Amino acid sequence: MRSEIGSGYRNRLGYNHAMLERELNQIGLDLHQQHDKAKAAVSKKNSEYAILILIELLKKESGCFESRMLLRVAQFERAKTRALFARLLGVVVHIVDLIQAHYYLRKQNYILAMQHAEEVLNESPENSMCHRIIANAATHLYFPRTAIASLQLLRKKSPGDKKTYSQLAAALETLGDYTMAEDVMRKMVELHPDDMQLLDEFRDICARATLERGGYSAIAQGKGTYRDALADPETTKALEQQEMVVKPPEVIDQMISRKEAELQAAPDNLKIAMDIAKLYLDRGDVDRAIEYYQFVKANSLAKDPAVDRAMTNANLTRFDQRRAGLDSSSPEYAGQVAELDAEQNDFRVADMAERVRSYPTDMELRYQYGELCFKMGEVAHAIESFQRTQSKPNLRIRSLCYLGQCFAQQGMFDLAESSLATGIAEKQVFDELKKEMVYHLGCVLEKLGRPDDALKQFKHIYELDVSYLDVSDRVLAYYNKKSRGGTV
């Protein structure tokens, strides 16, 4: 039997227990009375007094969400009654608190980071830096509702910020609000259709949402996947909370023991098997993790890309372990690393090819395969993939960009020009992707012996970003050669 959690266990936050948000009825009678007193003060427009009470209350029970939200109401009420100059002066006075909040956040003392951030919010309740600090600290403390409150404000102030949307979706997912999490990420993907990392996050959330909403009864009907929901909501909540804390080996062992007993009692519950695999990965036992993933694949009634992706990540973790086990002082170290890198690259290409064969209609997966082939020099396979993915609207322009580069590498400069010119024409905003296509088009036109046309492309970039790659050198070289009367 694996060891139980020892009484001396302390998590990375420095507390003997996981810091979780608490309800009013969980904070004790004295503090509950303090909250009621502050609430009465707010209702009487005495925000100064309410803030004093709530700041002290939160120092003792930082996870009391209702008290923190009442503090936020008091802060905004106080700001309404103060002149702009007084508010600005207050922020200047509390600049040390802002510095301290950043310091404690870096030191992973999240409670003190939040306390100092609140001092600044007392003067400027919409301060973006402080709300970012509180959102980050709350995430580490497993205060999802606290994080969401600050992230919603940040989203309102910066509606296009990808980091805010990603954090907000993660916090909503933690609370089990998959519908809202999907909506949040969907809006970001619509704003940034060419951001493949963002698209991957959105797809992962959608996959987890689908799996969590289903149950094993859906699998029996051929409609679901392995992720059946737990029957006991309290158990589900407890497990979600456990995932938010970095767990030492003895804790992981204890959780594995409990999960394996659960699986023996319910061998058809494939979610438990997936949880066990994840725990073994956390423990560093990749072989056991892969055994459980294989068990899930063998017993699932339908293919599930999430399981395949998990197996891929587990195998990549094995390469990382092998690399970490090499002796860096050995004279053979460099050769061993190069050999291992080559082996890992071969695995990635073969694995991705197999996943593409398994899910032939998944164009995002095929696009990722094309990217990988391009990076590995498998240009013919890359072209085949990008020719297919250009039919998908959100992948079309980036696929054309890659196609242009692939054709150029094969010396097919006329085809390269056509692909890149089409992508440039369809891309309305001159963002990083369009800049990349314009640059490659300029290089292709040079290869075609059309330096004047090439210069026009490079000048488009030069006017906006003189430091982009070697554009400056190319433009200056053109003019220098022309000034000397040479043939350009």
Image: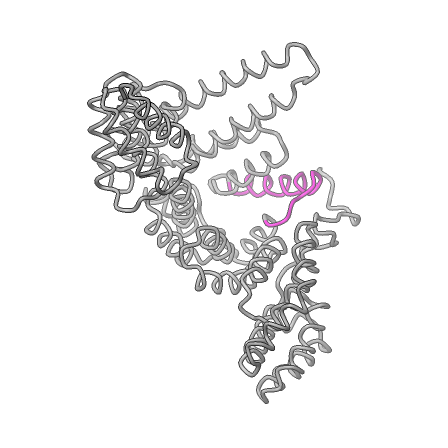
Q: Is 370 contained in the magenta span?
A: no
The magenta stretch is: 244-266
The residue furthest right is 8
> In the image, 160: left or right of 51?
left
Residue 88 % position (x, y)? 59, 72
Occupied quadrant, residue 61: bottom right
Please identify the quadrant where the N terminus is shown: top right
Residue 411 at x, y = what percent? 26, 16
What's the residue at 70%, 51% (across, down)?
13
Q: Is residue 427 left or right of residue 119?
A: left
24 to the left or right of 226: right
Q: Where does the C terminus fall, quadrant-wise?
A: top left
Q: Verify whether residue 245 appears in magenta.
A: yes
Q: Is residue 315 above or below residue 282?
A: above
Res. 407 image quadrant = top left
Image location (x, y in percent) of residue 12:
70, 47
Looking at the image, which is closer to me, 42 or 446? 446
Q: What predominant SS class does the magenta segment belong to?
A: helix
